[in-house]
């Protein structure tokens, strides 16, 4: 007997769609049955006409805890994730303090345990001195983050020699190295008057493309597994297209990089300020073409909320505005826009937003698919209804979204985490790896 049986839906995986009834036992997908096949279950729900998608895996999220909880915390950020269909997220290490030692990672895991509405994996920042690697690795972070520009000196891997040295240290550990592409030399040489134009000039497509090339070549030289953080320029994606076959590498972009241009700063201003900056219409068009062509492996959000007062404050230079915006609650809805326009289909959405991030970050046996043995993280999507994104509905402490007012076809009607429907008031998420370290 199943614990749960969802009847009448169409199961969508990265490989395609299948009409099937889905049975859940013990928190895992137990079977995909022929429609109407006799079966008993403790609970049975009819989902006729709906799509069943694996929960999304957002590989780039800043939950802001510890130290920055006025912006976001584990509870508010994971509530927002669950509301938007993200059932697993990977938390970045740039909090206060940055997560760069075994003690800091262990403390962060313990702080999160029991407060999560979705499952959360943690990423560690790689220090320039490469300290504490073995001890951190023993706690099973999903990645080490390697920064090549625009970060404090303790975490800056500025030169190609620095980057190669870092990847040589990580390669034997068998863990993914995530490289944020940039060029500190271009940033150092930038001159400006504090305007939006000066901010754009300090982080041009050339810097991004240079960072991508350096990351791929360093991966090829060291044999390290590398994931390149968000790209959003035509030059960057063309560089990626030419070099990606040289090494074991993957790349991501974000929904905002597929929608907004630098012209949108005139209306949204500080709320849209982030790195990399928004670029030209030709860059957005190039990113959308890359998505259609399968060149983008992962679409993540870089969810990076700030308090409204911080974004609204006066700053002498646009570069000084706190960078980042919320996004984890709107990932599914924004990607449904591209399903509606025909740029992608639902299996492609699942591939970029669920299957690929799960596989790339070592969660592929549990997450990213609705197949027997996988966690029963299930989204019920009704294609006959619509979703309207609104500031008033956002659960992040930032309380806004740059996508306010967007309407898309399709509506999320239920979210299951390991076979149990998510309850907004009862945290049921887990720290990924907590079984091994007694953190629950």
Image: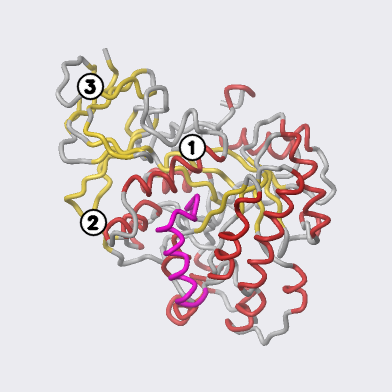
The spot of residue 227 in percent (x, y) is 61, 49
Q: Quadrant of residue 428?
A: top left
The image's colour scheme reads secondary structure
Q: Nearer the viewer, residue 314 or 232?
A: 232
Q: Please give the label number shown on residue 409.
A: 2
What whole-number distance in Å separates the C-alpha atoms at marks 1 and 2? 29 Å
Q: Nearer the viewer, mark 3 or mark 2?
A: 2
Q: Is residue 277 visible?
A: yes
Q: Is residue 288 magenta-colored?
A: yes
Earlier-in-chain disc, 1 versus 3: 3
Q: Please give the label number shown on residue 43.
A: 3
Q: Which residues are magenta?
A: 279-300
Earlier-in-chain disc, 1 versus 2: 1
What whole-number distance in Å separates the C-alpha atoms at marks 1 and 3? 25 Å
The spot of residue 165 in percent (x, y) is 82, 49
Query: In what element is the residue under mark 3?
Result: strand
Query: In what element is the residue under mark 2?
Result: strand
Q: Please give the label number shown on residue 160.
A: none
Q: Is residue 403 above or below residue 220?
A: below
Q: Nearer the viewer, mark 1 or mark 2?
A: 2
Q: Please give the label number shown on residue 116.
A: 1
Q: Quadrant of residue 38?
A: top left
The spot of residue 173 in percent (x, y) is 73, 34
Judged left or right of residue 338, residue 79 is right
Question: Quick one: quadrant of the N terminus?
Answer: top left
Residue at 77% x, 71% y: name it.
185
Q: Nearer the viewer, residue 388 or 259?
A: 259
Query: In what element is the residue under mark 1?
Result: loop
Earlier-in-chain disc, 3 versus 2: 3
| Mark 2 burial class by Cα count in 10 Å: few <14, some 14-19, many 20+ | some
Q: Is residue 315 visible?
A: no
What whole-number distance in Å separates the C-alpha atoms at marks 3 and 2? 29 Å
């Amino acid at each position: 007997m199943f614990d749960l049986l969802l009847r009448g839906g169409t199961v969508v995986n990265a490989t395609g769609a299948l009409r099937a009834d889905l049975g859940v036992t013990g928190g895992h997908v137990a079977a995909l049955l022929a429609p109407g096949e006799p079966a008993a279950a403790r609970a049975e729900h009819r989902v006729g006409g709906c799509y069943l998608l694996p929960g999304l895996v957002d590989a780039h999220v800043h939950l802001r805890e510890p130290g920055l909880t006025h912006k976001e915390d584990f509870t508010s950020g994971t509530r927002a994730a669950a509301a938007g269909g993200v059932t697993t997220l990977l938390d970045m290490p740039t909090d206060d303090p940055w997560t760069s030692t075994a003690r800091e990672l262990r403390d962060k895991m313990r702080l999160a345990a029991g407060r999560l509405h979705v499952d959360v994996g943690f990423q560690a920042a790689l220090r320039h001195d490469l300290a504490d690697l073995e001890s951190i690795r023993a706690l099973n972070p999903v990645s080490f983050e390697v920064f090549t520009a625009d970060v404090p000196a303790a975490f800056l891997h500025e030169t190609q020699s620095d980057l190669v040295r870092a990847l040589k240290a990580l390669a034997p550990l068998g863990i993914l190295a995530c490289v944020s592409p940039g060029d500190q030399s271009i940033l150092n040489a930038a001159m400006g008057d504090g305007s939006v134009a000066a901010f754009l000039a300090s982080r041009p497509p050339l810097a991004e493309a240079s960072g991508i090339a350096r990351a791929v070549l360093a991966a090829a030289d060291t044999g390290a597994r590398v994931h390149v953080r968000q790209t959003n320029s035509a030059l960057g994606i063309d560089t990626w297209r030419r070099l990606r076959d040289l090494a074991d590498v993957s790349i991501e972009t974000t929904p905002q990089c597929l929608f907004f241009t630098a012209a949108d700063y005139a209306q949204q201003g500080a709320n849209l300020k982030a790195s990399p900056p928004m670029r030209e219409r030709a860059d957005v068009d190039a990113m959308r073409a890359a998505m259609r062509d399968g060149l983008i492996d992962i679409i993540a959000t870089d969810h990076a909320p700030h308090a409204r007062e911080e974004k609204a404050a006066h700053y002498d230079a646009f570069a000084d505005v706190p960078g980042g915006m919320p996004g984890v609650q709107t990932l599914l809805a924004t990607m449904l826009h591209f399903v509606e326009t025909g740029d992608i289909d639902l299996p492609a959405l699942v591939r970029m937003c669920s299957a690929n991030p799960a596989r790339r970050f070592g969660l592929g046996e549990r997450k990213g698919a609705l197949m027997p043995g996988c966690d029963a993280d299930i989204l019920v999507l009704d294609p006959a209804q619509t979703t309207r994104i609104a500031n008033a509905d956002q659960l992040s402490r930032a309380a806004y979204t740059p996508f306010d007012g967007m309407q898309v076809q399709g509506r999320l009607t239920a979210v299951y985490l390991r076979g149990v429907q998510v309850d907004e008031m009862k945290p049921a998420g887990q720290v990924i790896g907590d079984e091994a370290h007694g953190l629950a």
